[in-house]
Image (cartoon, rainbow, N blue to C red):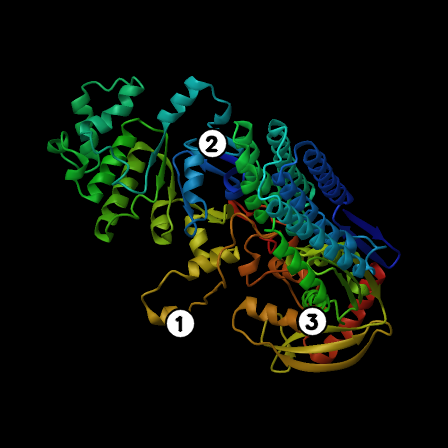
Amino acid sequence: MLALWVRAMGIEIHDKLPKKVFGVAFTFSLIILILTLGMYWLTHTPNIVAVMAAAIVTFANPLAALFVWSEKLREKTAVYAALLVLIIIASIGVIIYEIHTLFSEQFMSRIVNSGYAVLGLLILLILGYVANQFVEKLTPSIYWRAGRFIGEDYINVVYVSAFAMIGPAIAFFGVASLDPYLGLLTLLLALMPIPSKIRNLRAYLRRKSIAEAIKGTINNWLLRIPPIKEAPEIKVYPSGPVAFAEFSVVTSELVREKLEALGESIRIPILDMIGTLVGLHAQLDTTEKITISAGLPVEDSAVVSKLTNKYMIVKIDLGDLKVVGAEEIIVEGEEESQILEGLVSKKIDILCMKDFDKKLVNYLDGWFIVPLKIDSTSIEDAQKEIVTRIEELIKKS
Amino acid sequence: MSKPLISVRNLKKYFPVRRFLFAKDYVKAVDGVTFDIYEGEMFGVVGESGCGKTTLGRTILLLIPPTEGEIYFRGENILEYDKERLIEFRRKAQIVFQDPYSSLDPRQTIFDIIIEGPRYHGMDVGDPEEFVVSLLRKVGLEEYHLYRYPHEFSGGQKQRIAIARALAMNPEFIVFDEPTSALDVSVQASILNMIKHLQREYNLTGMFISHDLAVVKFMSQRIGVMYVGKMVEIGGSEELFEEQLHPYTKALFSAIPIPNPRVTRAKKKLIVKGEPPSPIHLPKGCRFYPRCPYAMPICRTKEPDLIEVEKDRYVACWLYG
């Protein structure tokens, strides 16, 4: 779900998983659980109990995502941890209780209505599969990893239901005594998703380091974009396996007209890189109170109109439109691509040359660097000309 | 330039890969390819192994059904052909496979192999023996080869038989799917010369698939460069060798070894890092960006379209967008 608000001086990006993904996940989990309860009441087979244990676990991953997705729940991840522990205990508890009952009854068969049991398990199998597919289909492609995470436990419902069918099916054909033995195996199979839930719990306990890692990735990407000068304050809300990110970025007035494109260049790569994000909220603002850098290719103390290894970086206060400093830098590399990469890494806002070919303009545009045509050949004249041209640029925009 | 004989529009071929029960992922072997092949021209297709060249060739001939897109033959969409017209198209469009060892039926004589197609299509070939012998001579074989079996021939000779079999149908379009890659270097040149000679003689339109750039340059008038299921650059053979626009094409051409060490040292090489992405989970945006030395933020967000940047020169790269 993407929303873009264009504000007076900037834009806001709200992008998160659609609400319906959670709606569908919880609805299916609930239906599957209620169905298993009803079927157990009707058939008394331990095989259904195994599916019930698997159904309980299906609540865990949607909960993990919901607790960071929802603004209200974001600060209450401790509640999520408590619920997760409860889910694990409930699932293991159901399994242990049933195994205990089986042993105490010395594997006496209790199954009734075995035909209904087979039919019900078939319905559960289909429901599990449909739930898994529904969740994935409703998830936008950029969140595919989060979508798979939310829907992964329904696959266990499918496996357990398929295995659980064997006992009641044999009972249906007259051999009911095998049902409890096969039930025991199904119950053990239902333990399969528990380790991954324990991993979720461990991830919750390590959520601070997970948040730091996500912050680092976001920061690295943002700081690669030349107009973003300072590391923004990034808030990451992790529940362990998934997280939500929030940050604001301030750039120079020079990119005001490209803010939407800049927003896309922030949103898509971050969501693509960090597959565990279920959403992000970013605020992009422009300011005049910023010092920008203009790069001048120089050779033998004169400005040249080609990509070189030596550049004069002129620092300009955008508010006062005054040169506040200059330094000479060397950009390593022989290849054009290496030089351009070097200029990007030096975070220049403007590249000044007499002439630009289309490819270079597109490359600079792509990195939100302004290609500025200047005529001066001496560095002093060029500095003055840059200030004048920037003033014209700002007036135009 | 003459009229397009084959026009491919947004052609896609996805192969399902089972993930879980009926849940599938898809290998995007050909993913939205658009180009034209003009009458009388040989269109080369290059790209690294697994980029979808062979799938593209086979999909154009409908040997495998496309997932999406349109294929026009003389301006008519062949996907809308009825059975009769499709059979006629199958006569007009032929393929020479990569592996001559497995593309000939070992239980048939050369005569039967070559005459089978014309017989099926009810073509009037006059005296069948004379017809087959004339074809064999055209591909550099002799009359005494007529009733021999495929195992009695070398790889090069088998490929000549495969070419004769394709020519027997009097085709208007032939896909040469790496016809020399399974052959010795000594045999490759003679086969290539023969194909070139036959192309001129029959005014054949063809698609020449190879990963050998020198071979494609020798054989083709225009070349399309493929990368992970997409056509990233199309241009005249000479122009493309003179100057490559797409960074992938540059990297591909940089990899051609030059025997002269001085030239090698002087030549600027563009070396790409890493491996091609998985055709199942392609990266967002341009599929080359993880390896591209010119990668920009937009490359991660939007996929570039193949656009005409000069006359008959197409490139799919944001540097030229």
Left or right of B110, for residue B98: right
Quadrant assignment, res A225? bottom right
Most foreground residue, B284 or B146 = B284
Give the foreground label among 1 and 3: 3
Callout 3: SS = loop
Which residue is tagged 2? B65
Q: Quick check: do tags 1 and 3 share a chain?
A: no
Q: Amino acid at mark 2?
A: Pro
* Residue at the (70%, 79%) spot, across then down: A379
Q: Residues within 10 Å of mark 3 (few under 14, many from 20)?
A: many
What is the C-alpha distance between the residues marked 1 and 2? 47 Å
Tell me if residue A43 comes above or below residue A81 in the rendering.
above
* Residue at the (42%, 32%) spot, across then down: B61
Left or right of B296, for residue B100: left
Q: Residue B117: image x %, image y %?
A: 29, 24
Q: Residue A181: image x %, image y %?
A: 54, 42
Output the chain of dot 1: B
Q: Amino acid at mark 3?
A: Lys
Callout 1: SS = helix
Give the foreground label among 2 and 3: 2
Which residue is tagged 1? B265
Output the chain of dot 3: A
| Quadrant of the frame with the C terminus of chain A | bottom right
Residue A59 visible somewhere in the drawing: yes
Left or right of B291, for residue A48: right
What mark, if any, has residue A87 been given in the picture? none
